[in-house]
Amino acid sequence: MAVSPDAGARVAALRAELERHEHAYYVLDAPTVPDAEYDRLFRELQALEAAHPELVIPDSPTQRVGGQPSSELAAVHHAVPMLSIRTETDTTDQGAVAFDARVRRALGLDESAPPVTYTAELKFDGLAISLRYESGRLVLAATRGDGSTGEDVTRNVRTLRQIPLRLAGEAPPVLEVRGEIYMRRDDFGRLNAAQEAAGQKIFVNPRNAAAGSLRQLDPKITAQRPLSFFAYGLGEVRGWTLPDSHSGVLDALAAFGLPVCAHRTRTEGPEGLARFHADMAALRDKLPFDIDGVVYKVDAIARQLELGFVSREPRWAVAHKYPAQEVATRLLGIDVQVGRTGAITPVARLEPVFVGGVTVTNATLHNQGEIDRKDVRIGDWVVVRRAGDVIPEVVGPIVERRAGELPRFDLLAAIDRRCPECGSHVVRGEDEAVARCTGGLFCPAQCKQALLHFASRRAVDIDGLGEQIVNQLVGAGIVRTPADLFDGARVNAEVLAGLARMGDKSAANLVHAIEQSRETTLARFIFALGIRNVGETTAKDLARHFGALAALLAADEAALLEVPDVGPVVARCIVEFLAEAHNREVIAALQQALRWPESAGTARPAEGRLAGKTFVLTGTLPSLRRDEAAAMIEAAGGKVAGSVSKKTDYLVAGSDAGSKLDKAQQLGLVILDEDGLRDLLGAGDTPPRDSQTELFGDN
Ligand code: IVH
């Protein structure tokens, strides 16, 4: 059938009108027509497109959801990396003063120079996204990933009505918009209620719900999830003359039809920033979405360029957080959890309370000593604190509100000295804070944690062996010890494909990952065993000292004490671990399954230009992973330690560096960024690796 010119024109007019209404409704929150009228226009367009399939275009308002689920999210390289911002840890006005002072110093402004102009925005608590528009059309949406490589979530993002498929006005050839996908609190509440009614997963907070919803393989699921978006910056841009200020950029993004949060201000000097910080703190609970602070950005783009970056963080921006939030609630009971090394942790069961953007129902009590010290008792009113992502914590009881006498809590008595997971004896050593289950790998809780630790990145690194799969493998009795993973009769593609949420492809990938992990190093292997108090650094020390597994297995406490940095506690943990018959069996089986190069014992002192120097690594480096940086330091004879002390010579700090950086500053240690490290190594010309940086923890 020939396309009637009338149909073509009507379709175009309908699309333009629908786009206008969608922008008014979803972005401006100011509907221009009644819902029924919108629906009528939408159905008319649908009918016309059905009658004239050749008129259907991907950007049509009717085409937001479509296609089959994909098997995985493809990797996307970000031409302009997605950076993080430094966090100002001082939550008082001083945080703003310190940022302004750094900016002024870096710009070489003396006291007589006028105040710097800033844009202050909210720090949305969702996940970063990059939207690529080519000639005004949304062609790619990608998550941040490690900053260099993210995941292609285009089909999912297309389902968000707040995100235009076509930009309004005259769009440049390439415009990458950076912003945050988040979930409103009311939407989150409704979603969880619906999930619960349907017997589906409950999300812990709006951010997790947003992340889980966005990273779906089936866009139809994302389409049903109430996601929102705010634009806050730019990525790659071609063929567009940028406004000369960040506030101008935000205005331009709004004019293109993108949602830009109205709570922002252009202001001057630290006073203006601190005022915004305070104003937004007062507004925080009334906002329809979670924020975890505010963000300050130098407004003039020319100045941003002048200021540039340190590691992966712009010098021209900072996140200024709010203090941890505290609320009072009732302690309903104390449950216990069993960790990898059998540690029995008391967990407070709380009357649900909303704090810092999430409903908290439990919080850690750490151990019996903490319970005694704080003197919290079941039935007490307690103060609960939540700081950002940190596990909520019981600060202490409100003794004045204690009704009559409440009994003290005794953890061991409460569980009758038996592990709640496996029934084994629970013991608490004389000078130990923590009570432990003696069940070892017989205990399913320990068994699962041990497997996860064994498979983790810095251990033998089995990519894709996550909690869900481990739970199923252990639950079904297929796997009990790490050695079982390498037993083809137990774990194979067929068995794995039979697990929930596993397809043939993921099963094959996991089998491949297991095969790859067979090739490892002695240090990784020792670390993977999960011996208490034997972290990555100690494992390396042990591997270097003994050179071969047989030598370590034969070592007694005295021999272990000869290893640099191994003290009596660590030595005893190793001896006890190796004394267990079932641990020996697992090690023997793993020795058959895995391979690593062994060197003769090397007790000789390290040589090289960094001999005798101790380094600590923290934060994300721009191009090196931590294991790579550590390997380079060690190759030059240096040593990498896990925590900062007076014995540390250098702290190598990347972005998002936390307490270690603070401590190193207090101790006045030499702090290096990646370039500084490379200079020290004399490796300044090593080509940067862009695609594999990662965030590493701060412990
Ligand atoms: S600007 C180059 N602005 O915070 C600066 N980020 O560590 C790039 N975030 O994951 C970020 N609200 O997704 C910027 N108004 C805002 C933000 C914001 C939230 C997130 C961002 C990133 C993290 C930065």
Image (tube, rainbow, N blue to C red):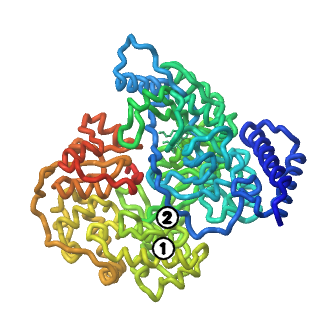
**Mark 2 and mark 1: span between their CA atoms?**
9 Å
The label number, if any, that marks residue 443 in the structure image:
1
| Disc 2 target residue | 338
Amino acid type at circle 1 is Cys
Crowding at mark 2 (Cα within 10 Å: few <14, some 14-19, many 20+):
many
Q: Residue at x 38, y 30 (%)?
A: 307
**Nearer to us in this view, 592 or 406:** 592
User: For numbered disc 1, what is the local secondary structure?
Assistant: loop
Find out if the beta carbon at label 2 lies less than 8 Å from the nearest ligand 1 atom: no
> Looking at the rendering, in which quadrant would you find the N terminus?
bottom right
Disc 2 secondary structure class: strand
Seen in the picture, residue 529 relative to 107 is either above or below; the reply is below
Query: 343 or 479: which is nearer to us?
Result: 479
The spot of residue 174 in percent (x, y) is 54, 45
Q: Are marks 2 and 1 in contact (CB under 8 Å)?
A: yes
In the image, is 256 to the left or to the right of 571?
right
